[in-house]
Image: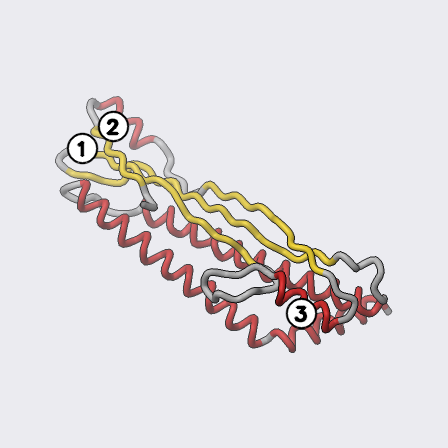
Amino acid sequence: MFLMRRVHRAFGAAFLLCLISAPVQAEPVISKSYSYFRIGGRTAEELDKELERHGPVTKTSGHRHPGATEIKFGGEVTYVERGGRCSVGGAKVTLRTHIILPRWNNGGKAEKDLRFIWATLSSDIKRHEERHAEIARNYARMLEKELLALPARNTCDGVEALVTETTRRVLAEHDKQQALFDRVEAKNFDARMTRLLQYRIDQRQ
């Protein structure tokens, strides 16, 4: 289950004062890590085949890709009962992203032009995956903020239902945004690479 339930019942004015005076901030616990898969190849065609052969398989597509970002949301919500009402007492969303990138074994032995192309391509792959991680971070913050802002209900079961629905909705929006980003990037890949290569050529002159 994504969110654990803990119910705290408030007793006494001192505890209530503590709850009221504590600032509520939406700042999820976010971590990011990297790993690499190695590829060979001495021509552009061989590099392309190596990426297809060794690239990570994503769960959404079932196919191999030149890079991937694994995303895992988690977290915890606590509930507070007072005055016959129940509300969210605290929410802490966690997000772990793990970016998988290619590493070219033959970079030092390849021709200069191919190294130039690889530098451009690998930089774009990293940028693409970093953007996936950024989208996830934005939605983690959005989710925590919305959970903390949920209204009180007569029972904690009612609040828990709101938490479940809010979590489902925000994560579904996250998935749609990630898929849209991939579609736009794939559609514009050729034009983007041409533009990036020309920019790097201009920088070298």
Is there a contact, CB below 8 Å, between mark 2 and mark 3? no
Which residue lies at the image location 64% right of the left edge and 77% below the top edge? Answer: 190
Q: Is residue 82 left or right of residue 199?
A: left
Packing grade of label 1 (10 A; few <14, some 14-19, many >=20) is few
Q: Upstream in the sequence, badge 2 or badge 3? A: 2
Q: Position of residue 9 (x, y in %)?
A: 21, 29
Residue occupied by mark 3: 49
The image shows a total of numbered marks equal to 3
Q: Is residue 134 above or below residue 185?
A: above
Residue occupied by mark 2: 16
The chosen color scheme is: secondary structure
Of residues 125 and 177, the one drawn nearer to the viewer in this rendering: 125
Query: In the image, what residue type sits under mark 2?
Result: Leu
Helix, strand or loop at label 3? It is helix
Packing grade of label 3 (10 A; few <14, some 14-19, many >=20) is some
Q: Is residue 99 above or below residue 200?
A: above
Q: Position of residue 130 (x, y in %)?
A: 58, 56
Of residues 198 and 5, the one drawn nearer to the viewer in this rendering: 5
Which residue lies at the image location 42% right of the left edge and 48% below the top edge? Answer: 73
